[in-house]
Image (tube, rainbow, N blue to C red):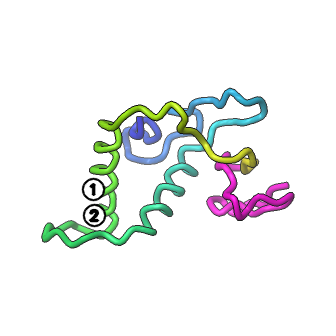
């Protein structure tokens, strides 16, 4: 679950918590911190509709919207063909490379390490 990536204090837990392994050889789980950063990047691409509700800050407003979407998606149909995209993986944080990064040498857009 999403909460398993976080400790009781709300901080990101070590990479092994809540991680699952990929069946392909040589592929390791992405670190929870990297997954949280990629989710944050996705949310920063959203334009939310005003709904008249007040929030303490934009961050918590976006998290509330993400939570609503998550619950709606959980109730949806199974997607047996859903899975991770690509085979290139950052050697530091474990996030998968995007299509525009698929070259022999690429820089991770999450942890900024150079990958070969």
Q: Quadrant of residue 115?
A: bottom right
Image quadrant occupied by the N terminus: top left
Q: Secondary structure at mark 1?
A: helix
Q: x, y (%) of residue 48?
A: 30, 69
Q: Does the segment drawn in magenta span residue 9?
A: no
So how many labels did they put on this image?
Answer: 2
Whether the residues at callouts 2 and 1 have beta carbons within 8 Å, the answer is: yes
Residue beneath disc 2: 61
Q: Which residue is mark 1?
A: 64
Q: Nearer the viewer, residue 102 or 1?
A: 102
In the rendered view, would you say 82 is above or below 50?
Answer: above
**Residue drawn at point x = 27 percent, y = 63 percent:** 61
- Name the residue located 67 percent from the left edge and 46 percent from the top edge: 94
Residue that lies at the very extreme toward the left in this rendered image: 52
Direction from residue 9 to residue 86 in the image, left or right? right
Mark 2 vs mark 1, CA separation in Å? 5 Å
User: On the image, which quarter does residue 49 sit in?
Assistant: bottom left
Residue bounds of the magenta highlight: 92-116
On whether residue 115 falls in the magenta region, the answer is yes
Task: Look at the magenta stretch and give its main secondary structure.
Answer: loop
103 displayed left or right of 27: right
Q: Quadrant of the C terminus?
A: bottom right
Q: Position of residue 45 (x, y in %)?
A: 45, 69
Residue 54: percent from the left, percent from the top? 16, 69
Q: Is residue 53 left or right of residue 96?
A: left
Q: Position of residue 64 (x, y in %)?
A: 27, 56
Instruction: Rate crowding at label 2 as few (under 14), some (14 to 19) or many (20 or more) other CA atoms within 10 Å.
Output: some
């Amino acid at each position: 679950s999403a909460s398993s990536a976080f400790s009781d204090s709300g901080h990101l837990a070590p990479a092994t918590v809540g991680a699952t392994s990929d069946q392909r050889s040589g592929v390791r789980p992405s670190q929870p911190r990297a997954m949280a950063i990629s989710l944050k990047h996705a949310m920063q691409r959203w334009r939310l509709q005003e709904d008249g509700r007040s929030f303490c800050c934009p961050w918590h407003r976006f998290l509330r919207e993400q939570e609503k979407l998550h619950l709606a998606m959980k109730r949806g149909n199974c997607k047996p063909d859903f899975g991770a995209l690509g085979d290139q993986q950052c050697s530091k944080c474990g996030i998968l490379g995007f299509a525009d990064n698929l070259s022999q040498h690429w820089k991770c857009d999450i942890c900024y390490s150079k990958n070969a």
